[in-house]
Image: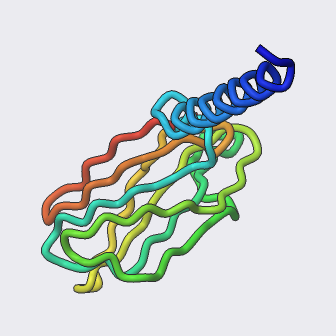
Amino acid sequence: MSVRAKRSILANAVLLVAILLILAISSLWKSELFRQFQSYTLTIDNQSDYDIVSVETGIMTSDSSGKTMESGSKHTYSKAIKTGQDQTIKPKLVIAGEGGIYMKFIDSRGESRQRTICSYTEYASGYSTVTINNDDVIIEENCR
């Protein structure tokens, strides 16, 4: 086999390994394993009979006496989330120290509800999935 043929085979093998490595890293990055380390993401599943017209997310912290309060870091999503629709939101939240993440939402009747959607975070990373029904709100969280 000539030197040129060997180099061609080696170049193709290196290219194939590089492509496979990129695909593997991409798949891992999108997996649950790394999802909790990415910037905070909120997925809302609106299973209620009413559209969600506004969603506010923000950081909650505690003062020296232990009283919970909202910090200045907030994000408002004002596009309607129709009945039966899922919506993923990537709020730009900043936290200094420890805290939690809350969500306030208003439905098309004007009814407002607030829930803690991430009970503890130091980095505003990870994700929460919130399912809104007529009578309750179901929260699954994996925050860091």
Q: Is residue 91 above or below residue 63?
A: below
Q: Is residue 113 above or below residue 1?
A: below
Residue 81 placed where, x, y %? 33, 76
Residue 54 placed where, x, y %? 41, 78
Residue extending farthest to the top is 1
Relative depth, front residue between 34 and 28? 28
Which residue is painted at 43% across and 50% down in the image? 116
Residue 141 picture quarter: top left
Residue extending farthest to the right is 3
Query: From the viewer's perspective, is 45 left or right of 19?
Result: left
Which residue is painted at 68% across and 62% down in the image? 73
Residue extending farthest to the bottom is 109
Which residue is painted at 66% across and 57% down in the image? 93
- Image quadrant containing the C terminus: top right
Residue 48 placed where, x, y %? 16, 68
Residue 71 picture quarter: bottom right
Which residue is painted at 64% across and 35% down in the image? 19
Query: From the viewer's perspective, is 8 left or right of 76?
Result: right
Relative depth, front residue between 9 and 136? 9
- Image quadrant containing the N terminus: top right
Query: From the viewer's perspective, is 72 left or right of 69?
Result: right
